[in-house]
Amino acid sequence: MTKPFYYLLICCFILFSNYAIAQVELSRDGGAAKILFVDHGIVNGVDSVNFSNGLELTYIRKISDLFNLAIPFKASVADIGAELNNRTLLSLDAIAQVPFGRSTKGLSIYGLGGVGFVIEEFEESNIQIPVGLGAYIPAGGNSFINIQAEYRLSTQELRNNLQLGLGYAFRLPKGLGERIKDRDKDGIPDDVDMCPEKKGVPTAKGCPDKDADGVDDLNDQCVDIAGLKELNGCPDADGDGVADNMDDCPNEAGLVVNKGCPQLDSDGDGILDDVDACPTIPGAKIYNGCPDTDGDGVSDKDDACPNTSGSKSTGGCPDSDGDGIADASDNCPNQFGTAARSGCPEPTRTTTTTVTSTSTTILRDSDNDGILDRDDKCPNKFGPSSNFGCPEISREVRTVLATAASNIQFETGSATLLTSSYSVLDQVVQIMRQYPGYSLSINGHTDNVGNDSNNMSLSNSRALTCMNYLRDRGIDVSRMSYAGFGETRPVADNGSAEGRAMNRRVEFRLFVR
């Protein structure tokens, strides 16, 4: 059997397949023609593969969506080995083809198994059991490319073989086999038509689709308006995933949980109403959207003195002497005292009089902390000697200063503060007022992006900007110093974006001179 003969047969089947494409009503019958590549070597213990050619003509009957019966007739000339060369083989099989689920976009992959009768050289015969895999690949209309691989186990020695096939398959048109019913005459066979008694379209699986949106009218909640499949055929004008018929704001993108409407920011402070503790009054993110009118670090809603700067420990009210008792309740508002004495100090315990030939000197300890006023950096506020007589900085204040380093923000490449930094610096102002005996160092730092000299200058300018902000709010410049260190003191790896962000900072440190 020569190669031109193979080619002629394949061309004939292609032409026949194209004829089948033009038909509307199709039968359950079909056919296929394939070129075979047959090897008797490697499956029988021979080290090499030696394919010979063959031809297969097959009748195919569709029994159901999950079962085809194929009757292939095969002819080949094979080299079997052991001096059995150029052997003419003829076979007739009965094969079950079982698809793996429904076809995807026309592609159908199937497993096969069956039994075959083989005649060799028109003299000998044997029985073979074929098993394998195959696929039908759409080639237009009802024509398919058919690929198949099968292993055949023989009852005769040295007759096991491997066969690979490539060719065309097709469904027979009306008049050449059993007709498939199409009761609604919409060109879609009843066995695949989801609405076999109503004229429909292929895009809706044979069901009517009035608005041509690919969703059949039965399941389309908006039959007269083209929409989206995922929204049951209804449109979504604003593209927010909520169908217009269910969207309270159909022309404005919003949230599903908000019935298609966007979340509101009534006061325009950048914090959405659902998380804004003061949704009608502009405020800062640090206070959950509430304002801090007096800038004392206590939001107005929690501030007992919202228009007068105070401290958190006194509910936002002033505490001039820092003894934790608000001035309004402090009988000695300018002297560090105790709650037991309503804010007044204990009676002075140490008064020493030294008499010399020329003068009398009185030594006092005004805040009763055991450190004489002449040696006390904070003579009116109780503090330990280890801190020069000044009160220890609270853990809360230390936390504020530590977080301020990463919360101070500037315009890119500039020393101009972003407005989001104001509330942080206002907290530093309150700390400076709360600890009048302390001084503040302000140190600017950058990452390693850019010129070293420019970074040094930029960090210096940013530290100065922060100091000027504190000065403008009443903090004496004699209590402050500033410096820029550029990229010389990183606290994280500059090799990552996160590390560089941590290195761009302004640090604040309180100390007693």
Image: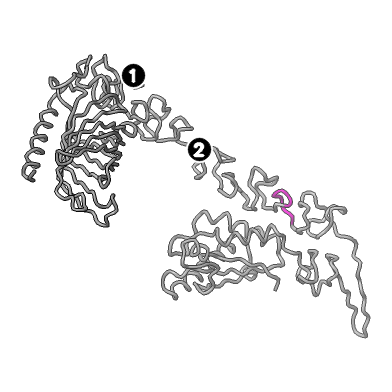
> Which disc number belongs to residue 218?
1
**Residue range highlighted in magenta:** 313-319
| Along the viewing direction, whichever of 213 and 78 lies nearer the viewer | 78
Which sits in the foreground, 245 or 511? Answer: 245
Residue sitting at 57 percent across and 71 percent down?
482
Residue plotted at (31% across, 20% down): 217
The tag earlier along the polypeptide, 2 or 1, is: 1
Residue 370, quarter of the rendered image? bottom right
- For mark 2, give the secondary structure: loop
Secondary element at image label 1 = loop
Amino acid type at mark 1 = Leu
Q: Tag on residue 266?
A: 2
Q: In x, y percent, where is residue 493?
A: 51, 67
288 to the left or right of 418: right
Q: Main secondary structure of the magenta part?
A: loop
Q: Quarter holding the C terminus?
A: bottom right
Q: Position of residue 359 (x, y in %)?
A: 90, 81
